[in-house]
Amino acid sequence: MRARLLVLAAAVAMLGWGAVLPYQYAYAASARGWGGLVAAGASTLFSVGALIAAPVGGRLADRFDPVRVAVVSKLLAVLAMVGLVFANSPAAFLFGMFAFGAGITAATAPQAVLVLRWVGDTDRRRVFAWLFTGGALGMALGAFAAGYVVDLTRPNGMRLAFATAAAGFAISALLIAAAGYRAPAATAYELGEDPAPEVGGLAALRAIWAVPALRWTAVVTVALALGFYAQFESGLPAYALTSLQVSPRTVGTAAAVNSVVIIALQMVVVRLTARRSAPLLLTIVGGIWTLGWLMLAAARLSPELASAIFVTTFAVFAVGETMYAPILSPLTASLAPEGMVGTTLGVFTALQTGISALGPLVAGVLLGAGLTGSFLVLHIAISVVAVAAGWRLRGLLAGATRSAAGVVTAGSDSAHPAGPVPATH
């Protein structure tokens, strides 16, 4: 029941996100008349707020009850939305978007920690898959519904969307609080963990970086984020419209197909890959990313098929997403230093956020300069890096497992691996 409440909380929260983010640029630039600089600045500050808040939320989840941390973070998002309802100046709007990004992302690591605490090993991938699917569905429904209530011809044309988003995050906070009330979060002692060490800032980063498997996981994370997620909302649509000359309707269809494939296949893929190691699946995801970019490159050679290939490619990317989403958080948590699960998850969330924020810049520079070939080659190369890094991580964890098995076989009371051997799922 607790896991279901978490999934429902994620879906309801993403309703609010989907109702706001697709329209905020045009709202600030045109409806409010503040111009493109303010609109772009709002998107940037949203990412900055997320980048700052992610590791803070993770660290707080290690030190305090993650239920409370998640609830407070959601309430921060509520306050941000209320502020945007009444924002009548560029400064107020920019601050509201910064707080919005911070509130959303600060809750990510605490929610992941709650899944790890409340769900057994055998069900974690399934629950993380449902979180991802629920969030994707919520965002799609929020964007769809907002399309009927947002009026970008009026200065107050998004007030209802902001108010709806505030209500969504408030309900999400209540659901998480209800889940915590039903079964209060276990203490570190009850979980068999050591209390979180008194480290933070650079010391925490050094502790995380000292784990070789986490370093390679970071490489995979960066490569996979750059290889698709960083371009999903900007680079890929821009490439389709400017280089493939497809219609805006085709771009919308591709995004819808992506969501539908995720919803349709997520649980099937989880069952089929339940006994496969996480590094192997990440390697496969890198291969799928590579295939997708090769298909996009081929679309330039067949203009008459470009629209069909573009839509199909988004379906191919969706298959990779169904593997990526359920395994990254459990894998990262299994590799985290003792007592630093939330901190590690927060750092990796910040890493993904920061890297993804580079996507529009990369796409703008290369596509704006007419370097379409370089844009494609760069992302094919990034995807190949993800494959290589995933394979290296797989070998590293397999070696650690064999070493641990050899130590146990030796039967010496004093012989043990230098630290916990991470699970490979």
Image (cartoon, rainbow, N blue to C red):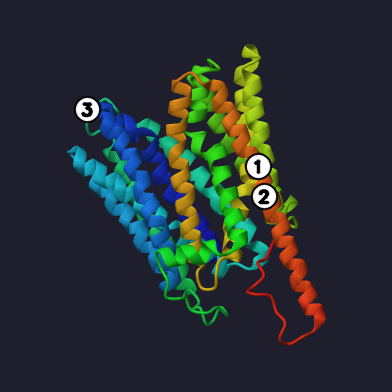
Single out the mark in the foreground, 3 or 2: 2
Q: Is any part of residue 265 visible from this angle? A: no
Residue 326's spot in the image, x, y percent?
Answer: 61, 53
Task: Provide the secondary structure element on which disc 2 rests.
Answer: helix
Front position in the image: 365 or 221: 365
- Kindly identify which residue carries mark 1: 286
Decide: is 201 above or below 285. below
- Residue 93, by quadrant, is top left
Numbered tag placed on residue 390 in the rendering: 2
Front position in the image: 160 or 268: 268
Residue with the most extreme left position:
89
- Kindly identify which residue carries mark 3: 33
Residue 407's spot in the image, x, y percent?
Answer: 77, 77
Looking at the image, which residue is at 47% across and 33% down? 233
Identify residue type, mark 1: Gly
For marks 2 and 1 on the same chain, the one whose residue lies earlier in the sequence: 1
For marks 1 and 3 on the same chain, the one whose residue lies earlier in the sequence: 3
Identify residue type, mark 2: Gly
Task: Provide the secondary structure element on which disc 1 rests.
Answer: helix
Separation of disc 2 and disc 1 at Cα?
Answer: 8 Å
